[in-house]
Amino acid sequence: MLWLIIIILLLVIGVLSAYILLYKKEIRNIAKKLQFIKDNDTNMKIDLQIKMKEINELAIQLNHIIDYYKTEKIAISKAQHEFKEEITNISHDLRTPLTSIAGYVQMLESEKTSKEKKAEYYSIITRRIETLIAMLDDFFEFTRIESDEYPLQFEKVNVNNVLTNVISLFYHDFISKGEEPSIQMPSTPIYIYGDKDALTRIFQNLIKNYLNHGTGNISISVKEEKHVCISFKNYALNIDNEEAERLFERFYIADKSRSKKTTGLGLAIVKNLVTKMNGEIEAYVEDSFLIIDVIFKL
């Protein structure tokens, strides 16, 4: 009887030892594959040579972590690439007016430059400096909005009044562009709950965007149905829906030459302010017209 007990114990110990060896082998296998995955750009996953419930569960969870790590790595790489592009674009946008100013200052210092030309160069330098200040203002404001240092004061706001006042500010700009906007808004006031100054800035940036990049036939409408929709529509032959969707990205400029002397932050600021006021904004192309809809709840 004693010998039987001893034999059974030895068998149990043998089986347990075999299991321990298998566990150790699989753990070493997992560790080796994790090291390889860490050191190499690979799509390898953890697979097991011997299926055991606990080890299998560990492998599943590790594969989930590997997938997450790869997704994050791709996102970081994309963000780094975009950041480098943005820095390059900012450098270009700031360097252009500064280089121009430096060139005109050099010509002003020349004794060969006539008084008439000097007056002209002074005027050009002033405009370049104003452009530079406007760009820096955009950078500063965008940074404030992104870092939540742009507090909003919510109140009942008359959309008709704000829009009419903003359009009147740009009257001479529209005349210089050789056109007058078509405006459709109801005679009765339309109200939203938001920040008056932020709404003013939204309308200003949308109109500036048109004046800088639009090619004609601008119309602005205000409608009230289940929500309030302020729509800006203008002719835009050289833009498609893919580009329209990117207009609200920071520093994005559809003009690849970046010759318009803008930062590409105007519409990014618009989107941030609309979002902060619990609204929505979308841009799309329809029959060669770019349409930007700003939507607020009643």
Image (cartoon, helix red, strand yellow):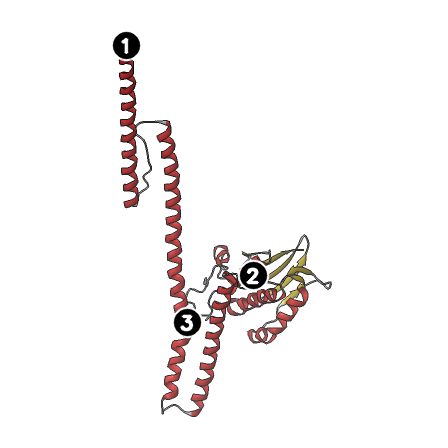
Q: Which mark is residue 273?
A: 2
> Do labels 2 and 3 touch, CB within 8 Å?
no
Seen in the picture, residue 94 relative to 64 is either above or below; the reply is below
To which residue does mark 1 refer? 2
Q: Amino acid at mark 1?
A: Leu
What is the distance, in whole Å, between disc 3 and disc 1 at their CAs? Answer: 93 Å
Q: Nearer the viewer, mark 2 or mark 3?
A: 2
Q: Secondary structure at mark 3?
A: helix
Q: Position of residue 262 (x, y in %)?
A: 47, 69
Q: At x 63% / y 66%, what residue is drawn?
A: 182
Q: Nearer the viewer, mark 1 or mark 2?
A: 1
Q: Nearer the viewer, mark 3 or mark 1?
A: 1
To which residue does mark 3 refer? 94
Q: Amino acid at mark 3?
A: Leu
Count neighbours of disc 1 (C-alpha within 10 A) and say few if under 14, some if 14 to 19, many if 20 or more. few
Query: N-terminal of the two: label 2 or label 3?
Result: 3
In this rendered view, identify the residue nearer to me: 74 or 260: 74
